[in-house]
């Protein structure tokens, strides 16, 4: 465990990086609320609710190093055709965001730009003359999907740079259809976050990636 990581909520709010801790907690709560991952109910009679606590972890790179000055989210997308990946990207976003929803929305906009190349690529293969139906764009964040389908700006999206609202135009034109995918089935995750080996292997196989022994 990183010695600089706070162990308790009290340590987080009085530590030297308390502002970052508070911002991270606020972002996490907003993300859970937006994605409706819980419902507030009255506890059943005679049942004691299970306790909870905050867990604070610093993001590190592949070498385990922490970049305290870099708070940009990791972005990624992958397009698959006939069971194999034909286009993919994994990189840091160009801007710092306030919430997971905003990061996912920017991801979706970046992927929407790639749709133009995908449609041109498939058409030039000569297999089909043109692509009439929208290309499916799958996202596991309900808030980002809602914002992408909303043609008007509102409180949560008014500060997002205009260049990231391209996805709204592509949806309106019928080039893209953004859909919900369960987080556990989101095959782009190996490009954006560390995963358990079994989950990593499953997602990479879904992209059409195989180990050398599979081809021998």
Image (cartoon, helix red, strand yellow):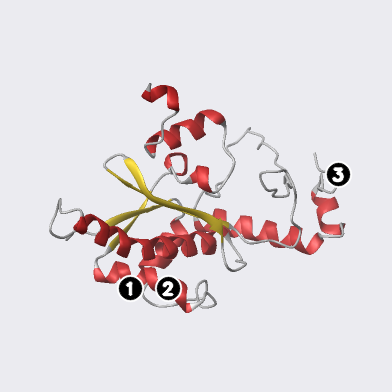
Mark 1 and mark 2 in contact (Cβ < 8 Å)? yes
Q: Secondary structure at mark 3?
A: loop
Rendered location of residue 157, percent (x, y): 50, 73
Q: Secondary structure at mark 1?
A: helix
Query: Which mark sits nearer the N-terminus, 2 or 3?
Result: 3
**Badge 2 density bin: few <14, some 14–19, many ≥20, Cα 10 Å:** many
Q: Residue at x 47, y 44 (%)?
A: 183
Can you identify the residue that label 3 sits on?
Answer: 3
Q: Nearer the viewer, residue 118 or 10?
A: 118
**Badge 1 density bin: few <14, some 14–19, many ≥20, Cα 10 Å:** some
Residue 62 sits in quarter: top right
Q: Nearer the viewer, residue 196 or 116?
A: 116
Residue occupying the far left of the picture? 129
Residue 50 sits in quarter: top right
Residue 49: image tag: none
Query: Which mark sits nearer the N-terminus, 1 or 3?
Result: 3
Q: Residue at x 44, y 50 (%)?
A: 140
Q: Residue at x 38, y 21 (%)?
A: 216
Between the C-alphas of marks 1 and 3, the distance is 47 Å
Q: Nearer the viewer, residue 43 or 192?
A: 192
The number of numbered discs placed on residues in the rendered structure image is 3
Can you identify the residue that label 2 sits on?
Answer: 165
Mark 3 and mark 2 in contact (Cβ < 8 Å)? no
Between the C-alphas of marks 2 and 3, the distance is 40 Å
Mark 3 and mark 1 in contact (Cβ < 8 Å)? no
Residue occupying the far front of the picture? 216
Between the C-alphas of marks 2 and 1, the distance is 7 Å
Q: Residue at x 36, y 71 (%)?
A: 168
Can you identify the residue that label 1 sits on?
Answer: 169
* Quarter that holds the N terminus: top right
Rendered location of residue 151, percent (x, y): 36, 75
């Amino acid at each position: 465990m990183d010695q600089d990581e706070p162990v308790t909520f009290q340590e987080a709010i009085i530590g030297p990086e308390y502002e970052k801790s508070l911002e991270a907690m606020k972002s996490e709560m907003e993300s859970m609320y937006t994605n409706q991952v819980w419902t507030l109910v009255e506890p059943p009679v005679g049942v004691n609710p299970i306790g909870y606590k905050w867990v604070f972890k610093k993001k590190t790179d592949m070498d385990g190093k922490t970049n305290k000055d870099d708070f940009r989210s990791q972005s990624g997308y992958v397009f698959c055709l006939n069971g194999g990946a034909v286009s993919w990207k994994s990189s840091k976003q160009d801007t710092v965001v306030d919430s997971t929803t905003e990061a996912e929305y920017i991801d979706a906009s970046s992927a929407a730009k790639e749709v133009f190349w995908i449609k041109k690529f498939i058409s030039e293969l000569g297999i089909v003359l043109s692509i009439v139906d929208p290309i499916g764009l799958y996202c596991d964040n309900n808030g980002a999907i809602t914002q992408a389908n909303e043609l008007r700006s509102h409180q949560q999206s008014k500060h997002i740079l205009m260049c990231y609202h391209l996805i709204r135009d592509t949806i309106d034109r019928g080039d893209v259809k953004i859909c919900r995918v369960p987080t556990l089935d989101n095959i782009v995750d190996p490009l954006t976050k560390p995963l358990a080996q079994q989950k990593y292997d499953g997602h990479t196989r879904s992209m059409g990636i195989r180990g050398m022994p599979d081809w021998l």
